[in-house]
Image (cartoon, rainbow, N blue to C red):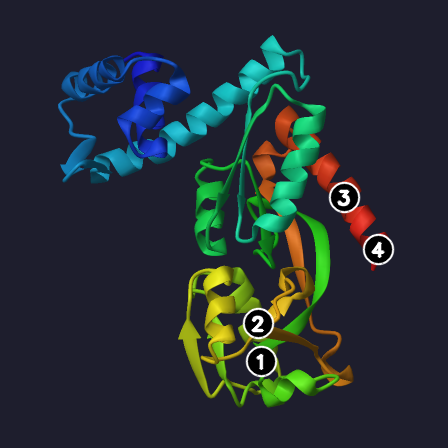
């Protein structure tokens, strides 16, 4: 068994296809296919099966992906240590987030300092991001209220109050403030169940023994705004997500509920937080967090 075979398998599995994996490794697609076939033939196992035009991991492939993720993470750290003398001059950083705003700003700052680092962002529900982080398919994540302790290192990034978002012609639109009790009498539009933002909002409602009259689930913020504009329901968003839109009204929560904030964290695995590319990202995020605190 050769390292190139394992790397070929890992890259195809994590990229979801031979073409993308070949571009990432700068090799030909037949070369990758040969490496994977040699690995399967050597041990008499099937690692992929075809689902139409897509590749899907077999149960054995799923198990091997988890193990090779750990191996590739260690390999990256060894390369950083030996080839770059513990500096940040080459490598990659994979960022996951359930909201793009802060992630994009941090990517911009990171690239200004380290232009040779290959940086990418994936926007997914918080639960999915956390799973990818745990499997070492992502390096850092920006998430609302992730689980503390254990295998994860959490660094606070930003805390923002929740705002009610309602149609511009709704009766609530003319109010100076609104309570969560009033809002719960409406149809609420929330993100998918794996969204940590949704989980945090539901926790705030449950803490006050409140539940919405009904819930409509929509997977993206843009689609939620469109649904509200059409009068389908209302929602809660943090202030930075309340973009100007003449069809919508953003109403502050009343004094009783004004302590209702959502806190975002930069998250990484405890065993990876000192890797140079991750360590520098955490430092940049810490400085950015200080700027946000001074603006509040």
In the rendered structure, which disc, 2 or 3, sits on the residue that comes first in sequence? 2
Q: Report how far apart the C-alphas of labels 4 and 3 lie in the structure.
A: 11 Å
At 28% from the left and 38% from the top, the residue drawn is 62
The image position of residue 293, as x and y in percent, is 82, 54
Mark 4 vs 2: CB contact within 8 A: no
The image position of residue 141, as x and y in percent, is 57, 44
In the rendered structure, which disc, 1 or 4, sits on the residue that comes first in sequence? 1
Q: Which mark is residue 237?
A: none
At 64% from the left and 16% from the top, the residue drawn is 89
Mark 2 vs 1: CB contact within 8 A: yes
The residue carrying pointer 4 sits among few (fewer than 14), some (14 to 19) or many (20 or more) residues within 10 Å by Cα, namely few
* Quarter occupied by the C terminus: bottom right
Residue highlighted by disc 1: 205
Q: Report how far apart the C-alphas of labels 1 and 4 lie in the structure.
A: 28 Å
In the rendered structure, which disc, 4 or 2, sits on the residue that comes first in sequence? 2
Mark 2 vs 3: CB contact within 8 A: no
Residue ranking furthest to the top: 83
Q: Which mark is residue 295?
A: 4
Q: Nearer the viewer, mark 3 or mark 1?
A: 3
Give the side of residue 37 with respect to residue 118, left or right.
left
At 29% from the left and 25% from the top, the residue drawn is 19
Residue highlighted by disc 2: 201
């Amino acid at each position: 068994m050769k390292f190139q075979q394992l790397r070929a398998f890992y890259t195809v599995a994590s990229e979801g296809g031979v073409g993308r994996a070949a571009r990432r490794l700068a090799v030909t697609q037949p070369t990758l296919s040969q490496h994977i076939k040699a690995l399967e033939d050597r041990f008499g196992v099937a690692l992929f099966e075809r689902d139409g035009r897509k590749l899907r991991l077999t149960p054995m492939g799923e198990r091997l992906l988890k193990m090779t993720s750990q191996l590739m993470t260690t390999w990256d750290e060894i390369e950083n240590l030996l080839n770059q003398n513990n500096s940040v001059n080459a490598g990659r950083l994979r960022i996951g987030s359930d909201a793009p705003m802060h992630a994009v700003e941090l990517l911009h700052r990171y690239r200004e300092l380290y232009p040779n680092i290959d940086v990418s962002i994936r926007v997914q529900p918080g639960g999915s991001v956390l799973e990818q982080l745990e499997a070492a398919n992502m390096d850092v994540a920006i998430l609302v209220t992730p689980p503390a302790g254990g295998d994860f290192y959490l660094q606070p990034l930003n805390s923002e109050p929740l705002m009610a978002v309602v149609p511009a012609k709704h009766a609530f639109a003319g109010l100076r403030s609104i309570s969560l009790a009033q809002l719960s009498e409406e149809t609420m539009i929330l993100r998918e169940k794996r969204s940590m933002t949704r989980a945090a909002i539901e926790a705030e409602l449950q803490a006050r023994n409140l539940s919405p009259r009904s819930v409509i689930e929509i997977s993206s913020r843009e689609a939620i705004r469109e649904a509200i504009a059409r009068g389908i329901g209302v929602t809660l968003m943090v202030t930075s997500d309340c973009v100007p839109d003449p069809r919508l009204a953003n109403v502050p929560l009343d004094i009783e509920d004004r302590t209702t904030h959502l806190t975002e964290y930069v998250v990484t695995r405890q065993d990876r937080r000192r890797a140079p590319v991750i360590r520098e990202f955490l430092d940049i995020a810490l400085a950015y967090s200080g700027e946000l605190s001074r603006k509040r």
